[in-house]
Image (tube, rainbow, N blue to C red):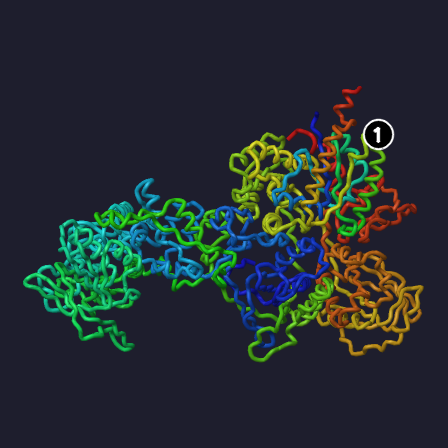
């Protein structure tokens, strides 16, 4: 029954859809011994079919009343329950239906979830408007949590590294800054660098932009980094893998190299970075100004990388990759970047005062000096050009002009950079291309022509001039900032590995170069890109190196290869107010242009909080994985679960959805038995009857799958009569009470006389928790145990308070592990301890009061009744109405032996004319014994042993039958008393509308026949009858009473009060009477025991003595 | 004033369901309220109710299903007749018939259950300890 197993279920009747009708159909089928695969699109099985509204006079507690039935069916060994599952196609193959089903990922395992709700407490989003984790509805007994996981948020999809921005925003909003930063570091080892200077494609993708402004995702990342830096040095997570003993050299310490080194280090490789410059950082240090990326940030992150185990050797220029391999590195990764400025190739470019961007910036950034003239012209429109211009301002240039071909809106530099440059006094001459540089020895003038980019579809972009006029601007310094290329052509390294276009490194799809064991990534392969793109390239290369060295699949999932989540992003609520994004405080332009200190000051705590709260949380679940930590021991939550496809072979399909089944090829409607959603328009009985009818009809084609009898409960393991009591306290995965309080509750039990073993269990409803109890019972020779958990009773039935966890705990303990139910007393502490509301002392006192009755019971143990009675499968149908004929024929089709009496009447009544005039059906199946007419004197006996006295052809005879059906209205008086109809009374019979109080006697109600087709009604009756007739054994009710014949005086009050005919008076040889209990007819209410004036009846497990002791004890003060 | 004790005898069906639901919802019950569960209110006899007073209960409340809801049929009717007769006896014994009460609930009436228990607890608090309590008897004699 594991929902996440990958095996296809064994053949069975496929029930598609949810609601009361489907529940009834699944019940009838499974209880008749036929396997059922029950699939619903919904997350629970009582969801009404599409378009159906509950009836107006629906009782408020109706769904609660369905709990026992729901649990009996969904936890039945013959039922495979599949939630969130769609039927994709249905076809007819070899005479049965082949169904293709698809189940959405089930992130919370229904078989393991303890419902402890700790995940909900830890989820940063669960106090908001769209809590991703929700309990199933209150009436729905599963209590398993549902996780709403929509497709990955656009911000995360847009990030080349796939950094989970949604999660760190959620955690930031919840005030968990350290956890938020840890989420960033899962995918990005340089949160500080990226927090300051990332080009933030996430923000461009942010859906909040549709409403007002995108989230300031980058600024929040910076806030997280700065916040951490205030508290201590930055630290990367410990490597995930131990040392592998393989060495990797990474050449170059730019973003690609640092990223690759980090990810390889995480996987246990010994990584050495070789950097030509004196300090690590590559382009982050050479090309990016300190006022954008303060050096302490870069240094802290490089330091953290070294701390985590990466070796960085600076001042070493690598001339040969092969040499590195020879030195003992198992692989080499070249991330050498683009180190050479492109040139304009215009006359005059060699004049003094004509500088190139990277040379200029690196001289300034590495502290080697650098100066500009009063009038500086920067040629180029990218971020580097802005950096150059702003650096020129800071070096004292009076007039800085940026010349670019692009218009303002086309500039490749980020708008924020452009705006800040303008604020600092940089002028722009846009829409111009330089055509010449001139001057006497030194630059004096730049000639420009109006131009724009022409971007033909079939070719590279080219410059198109718009005017013949040549304009010029005066310049003392010109900085050419029109992109970079590698410095590999002509270098020793460039001679060793194959180069591609533009001097870039040529790699295959595995990012391998022409040299075996040598890989390449980053700008040296792709040409100039952004920091985050280079880092992503570094990780991709790390994955290839990992694959090359280990032969294993990549340990890092790339989002584009891992689509997950279900449905659509959360909608933007109409109630959401527009709210501008938070902006970092900034130094004034006239102040900041004087130095190289940081321009922005970062978000404050309250700003970061407010900004993070603006996040729309598109995917609902943000995958911060906080909940997995809470569920570690239970193991119910797994965010990486995938949906699955299932194939099912079904002899018949019960269709409880709107519309038609998705047939492929030839439709076979005779295999599909619908429960029309229209039936919900009448009332509950009709719906349930339609369910039974569908089940009854499906049973004929499915008869071959019937298992002889539903596996009976295993006989309990023998238990020692040691008088040793065990006390077990369920911690409910830590949610029962704080650990010290649990320990004190255990201490309460320790000194109690007879207590031999005391222990806590992490979760009783978890297989391992139940195992722990069973082992302790064996090891400590326990004869009785008290189980303090959420379980209310150890009995083998469900009441309306029951839920899945309670049912599961009992399934594990009693059915799987074979403990004797009678040795266990359970106390539901879980629902009533209210640990969150009280002090430790109060918790302990509350537990003490609740545990007291359990210890009283230990002193008055009483056995549960555990017997069974064998039954056969003979069905007597009285009344040849259409319903009777239909029932008889459906039962015969299922292979049961049936006697049908066409015309029957109770003794002392006349046969109504309508029945007398009814023609006989003479086309009945062979295994139906037809009788034309009979007078029925009485139905005596009990289920499995009825004696029906009948007069036919003038002679009295007695028929034996296991089940009797009354299918003509004139016969209903044989079993039904006044006042036993109506919806509420109906609960009593577990919604089996054909049941009479007399177990084993079925009848049709006139009110039913007014509404439904008699053929359907007969099929439904057959379905219900089959649930009894399929059984081989009838189990005793565990609470059925015993009679003390010495006390019983035969007054008959017990028999009078029992509506289930479970008590009869047996005449003794001396003429007196003694009560006799039919234990399988008994329902265990104890009404007879309460009614008995001489206490001759008693329920061993719930004895009069026990009740008295409990009444006395619960108000006492001992234990 | 001495603390009073209240005993609730609850049917396993609707009232127990309300009681559990109230617990799950974190609704607080009077701290002097103790509960005992039986499968059906028809299970208990008059003697048991009287025993509760004998053993020191100051108030007893029977928590039952509505007549038409009884899973078994005759339970609440039996409860009514038991309560009527025991109340008479309590009156004769000088304990006071108002110390015994019966209430019926549907399965989704957790709030009603909690309210009824607080109200009953308040009433018994006002009435003070049951004069038939073992300790008091001894003092009187």
Residue A662: which quarter of the image? bottom right
Q: Position of residue A1109 (x, y in %)?
A: 73, 34
Residue A854: which quarter of the image? top right
Left or right of A782 in this view: A582: left
Question: Which quarter shows the N terminus of chain A?
Answer: bottom right
Q: Position of residue A1039 (x, y in %)?
A: 73, 46
Q: Position of residue A393 (x, y in %)?
A: 20, 53
Question: Which quarter shows the C terminus of chain A?
Answer: top right
Q: Is residue A71 above or below residue A507?
A: above
| Residue that lies at the very extreme toward the bottom in this rendered image | A666
Element under disc 1: helix
Where is mark 1, residue-wise? B93
Left or right of B39 in this view: A282: left
Which of A481 and A1030 lies nearest the eye of the viewer? A481
Chain letter for the residue marked with disc 1 in the picture: B
Residue that appears at 30% across and 51% down? A196
Which of A670 and A205 lies nearest the eye of the viewer? A205
Q: Do we see residue A546 in this rendering?
A: no
| Residue that lies at the very extreme toward the left in this rendered image | A441
Left or right of A135 in this view: A797: right
Q: Is residue A779 above or below residue A1023?
A: above
Q: Position of residue A100 (x, y in %)?
A: 54, 70
Q: Is residue A917 above or below residue B121?
A: below
Q: Do we see residue A46 in this rendering?
A: yes
């Amino acid at each position: 029954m594991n929902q996440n197993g990958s095996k296809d279920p064994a053949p069975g009747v496929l029930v598609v859809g949810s609601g009361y009708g489907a529940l009834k159909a699944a019940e009838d089928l499974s209880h008749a011994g036929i396997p059922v695969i029950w699939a619903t699109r919904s997350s629970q099985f009582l969801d009404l079919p599409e378009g159906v509204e509950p009836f107006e006079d629906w009782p408020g507690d109706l769904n609660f009343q369905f709990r026992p039935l729901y649990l009996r069916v969904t936890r039945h060994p013959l039922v495979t329950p599949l939630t969130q599952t769609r039927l994709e196609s249905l076809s007819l193959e070899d005479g049965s239906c082949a169904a293709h089903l698809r189940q959405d990922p089930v992130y919370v395992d229904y078989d393991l979830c303890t419902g402890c709700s700790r995940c909900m407490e830890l989820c940063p989003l669960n106090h908001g408007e769209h809590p991703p984790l929700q309990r199933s509805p209150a009436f729905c007994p599963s209590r398993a949590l549902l996780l709403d996981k929509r497709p990955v948020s656009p911000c995360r999809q847009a990030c080349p590294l796939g950094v989970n921005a949604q999660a760190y925003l959620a955690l930031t909003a919840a005030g968990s800054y350290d956890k938020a930063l840890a989420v960033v570091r899962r995918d990005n080892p340089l949160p500080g660098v990226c927090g300051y200077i990332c080009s933030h494609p996430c923000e461009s993708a942010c859906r909040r932009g549709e409403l007002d402004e995108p989230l300031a995702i980058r600024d929040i990342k910076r806030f997280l980094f700065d916040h951490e830096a205030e508290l201590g040095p930055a630290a990367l997570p410990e490597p995930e893998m131990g040392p592998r003993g393989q060495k990797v050299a990474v050449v170059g310490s730019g973003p690609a190299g640092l990223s690759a080194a980090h990810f390889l280090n995480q996987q246990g490789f010994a990584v050495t970075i070789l950097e030509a410059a004196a300090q690590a950082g590559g382009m982050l240090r050479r090309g990016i100004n300190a006022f954008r990326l303060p050096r302490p940030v870069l240094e802290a992150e490089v330091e953290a990388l070294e701390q985590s185990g990466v070796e960085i050797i600076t001042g070493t220029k690598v001339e040969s990759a092969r040499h590195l391999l020879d030195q003992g590195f198992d692989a080499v990764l070249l991330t050498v970047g683009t180190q050479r400025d492109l040139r304009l190739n215009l006359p005059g470019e060699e004049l003094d005062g004509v500088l190139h961007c990277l040379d200029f910036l690196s001289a300034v950034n590495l502290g080697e000096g650098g100066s500009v003239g009063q009038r500086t012209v920067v040629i180029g429109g990218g971020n580097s050009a802005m950096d150059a211009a702003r650096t020129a301002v800071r070096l004292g240039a009076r007039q800085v002009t940026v010349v670019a071909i692009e218009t303002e809106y086309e500039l490749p530099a980020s708008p924020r950079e452009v705006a800040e440059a303008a604020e600092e006094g940089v002028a722009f001459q846009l829409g111009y291309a330089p055509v010449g540089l001139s001057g006497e020895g030194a630059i004096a003038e730049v000639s420009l022509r109006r131009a724009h980019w022409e971007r033909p579809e079939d070719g590279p972009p080219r410059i198109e001039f718009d005017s013949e006029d040549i304009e010029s601007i005066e310049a003392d310094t010109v900085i050419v900032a029109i992109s970079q290329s590698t410095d590999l052509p002509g270098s020793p390294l460039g001679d060793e590995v194959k180069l591609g276009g533009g001097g870039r490194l040529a790699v295959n799809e595995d990012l391998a170069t022409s040299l075996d064991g040598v890989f390449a990534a980053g700008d040296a392969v792709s040409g100039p890109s952004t920091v985050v793109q280079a880092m992503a390239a570094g990780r991709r290369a790390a994955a290839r190196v990992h694959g090359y060295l280990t032969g294993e699949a990549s340990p890092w999932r790339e989002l584009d290869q891992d689509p997950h989540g279900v449905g659509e992003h959360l909608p933007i609520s109409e109630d959401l107010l527009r709210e501008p994004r938070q902006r970092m405080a900034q130094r004034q332009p006239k102040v900041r242009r004087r130095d190289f200190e940081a321009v922005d000051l970062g978000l404050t705590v309250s700003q970061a909080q407010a900004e993070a709260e603006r996040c729309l949380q598109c995917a609902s679940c943000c995958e911060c994985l906080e909940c997995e930590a809470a569920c570690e021991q239970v193991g119910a939550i797994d965010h990486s679960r995938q949906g699955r496809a299932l194939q099912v072979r079904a002899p018949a399909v019960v269709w409880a959805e709107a519309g038609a089944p998705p047939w492929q090829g030839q439709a076979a409607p005779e295999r599909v038995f619908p429960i029309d959603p229209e039936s919900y328009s009448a009332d509950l009985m009709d719906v349930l009857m339609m369910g039974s009818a569908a089940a009854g009809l499906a049973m004929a084609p499915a008869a071959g799958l019937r298992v002889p009898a539903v596996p009976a409960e295993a006989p309990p393991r023998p238990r020692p009569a040691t008088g040793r009591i065990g006390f077990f306290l369920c911690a409910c995965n830590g949610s029962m009470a704080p650990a010290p309080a649990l320990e004190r509750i255990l201490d309460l039990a320790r000194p109690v006389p007879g207590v031999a073993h005391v222990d806590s269990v992490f979760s009783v409803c978890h297989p391992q928790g139940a195992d722990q109890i069973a082992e302790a019972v064996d090891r400590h020779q326990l004869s009785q145990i008290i189980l303090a958990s959420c379980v209310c009773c150890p009995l083998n039935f469900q009441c309306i308070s029951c839920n899945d966890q309670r049912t599961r705990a009992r399934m594990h303990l009693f059915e799987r592990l074979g403990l004797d139910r009678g040795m266990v007393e359970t106390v539901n502490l879980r629902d009533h301890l209210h640990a969150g509301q009280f002090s430790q002392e109060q918790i302990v006192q509350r537990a003490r009061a609740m545990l007291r009755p359990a210890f009283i019971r230990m002193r008055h143990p009483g056995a549960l009744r555990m017997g069974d009675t064998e039954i056969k499968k003979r069905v007597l149908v009285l009344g040849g109405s259409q319903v009777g004929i239909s029932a008889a024929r459906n039962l015969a089709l299922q292979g049961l032996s049936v006697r049908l009496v066409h015309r029957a009447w109770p003794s002392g009544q006349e046969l109504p004319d309508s029945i007398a005039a009814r023609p006989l059906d003479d086309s009945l199946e062979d295994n139906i014994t037809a009788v034309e007419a009979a007078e029925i004197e009485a139905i005596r006996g009990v289920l499995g042993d009825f004696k029906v006295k009948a007069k036919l052809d003038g002679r009295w005879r007695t028929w034996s039958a296991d089940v009797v059906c009354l299918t003509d209205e004139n016969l209903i008086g044989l079993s039904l008393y006044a006042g036993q109809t109506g919806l509420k009374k109906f609960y009593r019979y577990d919604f089996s509308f054909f049941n009479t109080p007399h177990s084993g006697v079925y009848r049709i109600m006139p009110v039913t026949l007014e509404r439904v087709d008699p053929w359907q009604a007969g099929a439904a009756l057959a379905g219900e009858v089959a649930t009894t007739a399929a059984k081989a054994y009838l189990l005793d009710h565990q609470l059925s009473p015993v009679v003390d014949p010495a006390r019983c005086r035969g007054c008959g009050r017990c028999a009078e009060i029992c509506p289930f005919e479970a008590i009869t008076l047996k005449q003794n040889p001396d003429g007196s009477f003694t009560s006799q209990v039919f234990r399988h007819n008994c329902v265990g209410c104890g009404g007879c025991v309460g009614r008995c004036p001489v206490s001759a009846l008693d329920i061993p497990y719930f004895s009069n003595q026990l009740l008295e002791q409990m009444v006395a004890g619960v108000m006492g003060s001992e234990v | 004033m001495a603390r009073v004790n209240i005993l609730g005898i609850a049917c396993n069906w609707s009232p127990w369901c309300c009681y559990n639901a109230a617990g799950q919802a974190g609704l607080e019950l009077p701290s002097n309220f103790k509960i005992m569960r039986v499968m059906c209110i028809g299970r208990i006899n008059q003697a048991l109710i009287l025993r509760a007073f004998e053993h020191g209960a100051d108030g007893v409340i029977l928590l039952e299903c509505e007549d038409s809801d009884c899973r078994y049929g005759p339970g609440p009717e039996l409860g009514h007749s038991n309560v009527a007769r025991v109340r008479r006896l309590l009156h004769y014994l000088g304990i006071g018939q108002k110390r015994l009460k019966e209430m019926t609930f549907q399965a989704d009436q957790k709030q009603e259950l909690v309210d009824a228990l607080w109200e009953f607890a308040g009433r018994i608090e006002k009435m003070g300890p049951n004069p038939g309590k073992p300790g008091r008897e001894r003092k009187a004699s």
